Structures are given as structure tokens and as C-alpha cells.
Amino acid sequence: MAEEKNVAAEENVIVLKEAAARDEDYVIKLKKPYLFEGQEYAEIDLNGIKEMTIRDGIDAQKALFNGEEIAAVVMAEVSTSFARMLAAKATGLPIEFFELARIDVSRAVKGIVMSSLNTSGGTENHIMKLDEPYSFKGKAYTEIDLTRIGELTSLNESQAENRMAEEGFAAANVQQNFVYACVIASMATGLPEEFFFGLPLREIMKLKGAVNDSSFFE
């Protein structure tokens, strides 16, 4: 099962992972050490990704956009560049550490980052179940009711696009943009944007999918 989840379990890399989603040990053990700036690394600890938020994902997406890596922005979550940026944030290592890594190491890193964005729980009848209780301003949330997205108007869409522009994004491919997802969810729920920006990073794909559920647009 671990081999299926991680394309990176190649001959030079062992990825240690546990079955329980939130108890996973995001550590890459290297059979062949990686030399970077005169230091050998036998492992890469990516456990910091557990503490990251959707805002971190937005920042990574913005960096890709500003770098004009447009294809990566459209589908950031499958981009190697996106994975590198999140890994650098999670570890505190410079981005060059990941840019210069051997391809087996790079694939291991990407495998863990992508795996960390797959959460338990889901969305049913536009009720988004959170992977773990989320505390915001003294209240714990276990789910988010997004049913009112279907009541939003074209004006709301324009307002969300304007917020994207304020964050540094062009109003293109809104369905793939993390800021857009957070702003639309905020409008539909009455919860502040900060609520959604502060959600754990692992909820980012679930939120984007829930906001863009095709049944809202039939």
C-alpha cells in the first residue's frame, strides 16, 4: 500500500509512512545520502507540513504565478514546483535544497507533499467534513456548510475575482485558485476569509473541490 501511495519508493529512497492519516511520519530515509552545500543528508523530515495552513498553499501558488509558471498555477497541486515550495516551508531548508536534489529524492518529496493533501472525510450535500476539529476564535468546527454557494450571484463572483487581484492573481482559471475558493466559501457561510486561510493545508483540495462542485452550476 505504501508503494502505491508514493511514486518515490525507488531503489535509493525509503519513505516511512503509517496507515493512520494524521499519524503519518513524513520522513524520507535516504539509502544514498544527499550532499548539499558540503553537508550530507541521510533523511528529510517533512513533518512540518502538518502545521501548515491554506495560506501557505496560497503563498506557494502566488510564487508560481509571479514566476510566470502558468501551467503550474493552473494545477498547482500536481506541480513539482509547488511541492518544492511547500517542502521548503515545512523544513526550513532553502528552496535550492529541493531544486538541486536528485530525481529520486525529488519524487519522494513530491509524493509525501501530495499525500499530505489527501484527507479523510469528504463533502456530502455540500457539507464539508473537516479532517480534525478546527478551532477559530474559541469555537471548534467539525464541518462547514457550503450549501449557500448556489445562492451567490455574478456580482459575488466579480468580488471574489477582485480579491484574487488584491492577492496578486489574475482573474483567470478561478476554479483552480485557492484564494477564490476561500473567498467564495466566506461569502456563502458568513465566516471571515481568515477562517478559511487558517484551515490546515490538508483541507485545501477538499475545499477547492467543494466550492466548485458541478451541481452548483447545473
Image (cartoon, rainbow, N blue to C red):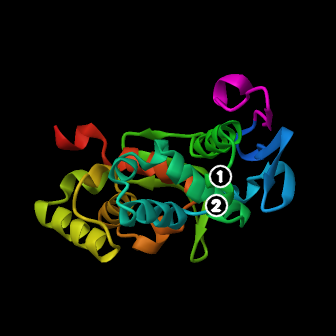
Can you see residue 184?
A: yes
Secondary structure at numbered mark 2: helix
Can you see residue 132?
A: no
Residue shown at the point (67%, 66%) measured from the top left: 94
Secondary structure at numbered mark 1: loop
Task: Classify residue 202 as left or right of residue 109.
Answer: left
The residue carrying mark 2 is 96
**Nearer to the camera, 89 or 175:** 89
The residues colored magenta run 1-19
**Nearer to the camera, 191 or 79:** 79
The disc label shown at residue 100, or none:
1
Task: Classify residue 1 as left or right of residue 188.
Answer: right
Residue shown at the point (65%, 29%) measured from the top left: 5
Label 1 and label 2: CA atoms lie apart by 6 Å
Quadrant location, the N terminus: top right
Q: Above or below — where is 3 with respect to 116?
A: above
